Image (spheres, grey):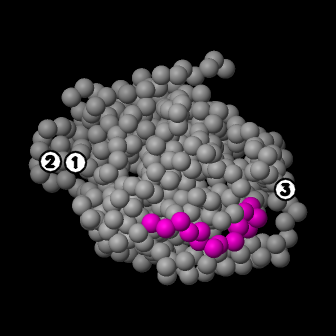
Amino acid sequence: MDGDELCYLSATELLAAYRSRALSPVEVARAVLARIDEIDPQLNAFRLVDPESALRDAQAAEARWAAGTPCGALDGVPASIKDIILTRGWSTLRGSRTVDPAGPWEVDAPCVARLREAGAVLLGKTNTPEFGWRGTTDSPLTGVTRNPWRLDVTPGGSSGGATAAIAAGLGALAVGTDGGGSIRIPAAFTATVGFKAQFGRVPAFPLSPMGNVAHIGPQTRTVADAARMLEVLAQPDDRDVTALPPTAHDWAGDVASGARDGGIRGLRIAFSPRLGYVRYVDPRIERALEAAAGVFASLGAIVETADPGIEDGTEAFRVHWFASARHLLHRFPEDQLALLDPGLRAAFDSAASLTLPEFLEAQATRGRIALQMRDFAQRYDLLLTPATAVAPFAVGLVMPKVPDVASPSGAHDWSWWTPFSYPFNLTGQPALVQPCGFTDDGLPVALQLVAPAFREDLCLRAAAAYEAATDWHRRRPTLGVQAPKT
């Protein structure tokens, strides 16, 4: 097996190979690190790579496998951490020139601690826009991150470094965060799997300054790996007072169940191409989603075109997000504010005019949408939507050219092209994105499955069934278009 093939093995495949002694964690880590050296200069997916630490992790995993005593469910699997999540021994700069690299950096966030306990080989920190504020991955600190499917387009964001890495074979697993689509948007743009579980399912510390719209979750290449990773990340941590009670649910079993013949027969799926109010969706995405709905129907699901009947939460999300940005940055002196991404600074400044009644009304809107989705769940098991309204667009932009019908509220308002993401941050319920096609010019298209509250199992069952019936997840980028000189 050559290095490229080895680097594209899933976590599930790697663990089977370690168990049979066909591969060793050190062999895999060396291949992935070599591929990072070769490819990442084109992508700029990583802010920090630590080969010495990764090889130490891999050597320890190799010794455990040789002794027949693997320490956890991901022993020896290469993984990366988004550079917005605390990681012991590595700086967490959050894409910002305002963060002091000196630290100290002595604490692992819960998700990092769980990965270490499970034996994962940690490669380094992946790029993020400044404080994760936007749906593309560009920052004043680290510059532009590019999409391995085409280097002149964005991988999305804010977990774009994570998804660019796994799409390019630079590790099997990555941790992302999602406060308005930041796991799911880049998964859609890179033909990977992004899973935002129920809010509180994956413990966090410190809690996000963006409040209880912000989730942590798996970025993977397969649905089975997303389930396996979620089982690790969802282990309890007392530092998160908002976390859900521990569960012993077998999410990997849900994947196996869904992938079997008849695994989703009788499942009630509502196909909503525009949620009832979205003004613009790229016609190529609409066609791909119609085809995907047909696949689910062919697998025995009961698929009906139906909107969920929720109100448009754009303004509620804008108020919550901008107010949170104001809270995050309000103690910064002017010299630090001057270092910010101009779009983030604009959001900070605009939030100064928000009032307490406006914020409370946004919270009330969240509550109404959550109740509307609860009622919808009485009729349907899952909601199927596009993942984004647009295909991947040029790097360096907050958003593509705005169609006349989209009518965004401001120059940095990217809600119009991500209208399928943030409603389910407002409600906190599970949502999974996976590839469902490509445009005529070779760019990924993705679907989203939204489950009722606390029902991650339904997302995983349906996603596994779709993945088993299609081959979109098996395609690989060629990195054939070189990045322009800047």
Task: Classify residue 228 as left or right of residue 395.
Answer: left
Task: Identify residue for label 1.
Answer: 15
Instruction: Give the structural element (helix, strand or loop) at label 1.
Output: helix
Up-down relation of residue 390 to residue 39 (above or below) = below
Q: Could you tell me residue 423's position as x and y percent? A: 62, 65
Tell me which numbered mark, 2 or 3, is placed earlier along the sequence.
2
Tell me which numbered mark, 3 or 1, is placed earlier along the sequence.
1
Residue drawn at (38%, 36%) of the image: 475
Residue drawn at (19%, 38%) of the image: 24
Q: Could you tell me residue 346's position as x and y percent? A: 81, 49
Name the foreground residue: 414 vs 59: 414
Task: Classify residue 117 as left or right of residue 387.
Answer: left
Q: How far apart in space, not on screen, are marks 1 and 2 (Cα)?
A: 6 Å
Crowd class of label 2 (few under 14; some 14 to 19; many from 20; radius 10 Å): some
| Image quarter of the N terminus | top left
Dot 3 amino acid type: Ser
Magenta includes 313?
Answer: yes
Dot 2 amino acid type: Arg
In the rendered structure, which segment of residues is drawn in magenta?
Answer: 303-320
Task: Identify residue for label 3.
Answer: 350
> Is residue 286 at all visible to an observer of this figure?
yes
Which circle marks residue 19 in the picture?
Answer: 2
Residue drawn at (27%, 45%) of the image: 76
Dot 1 amino acid type: Leu
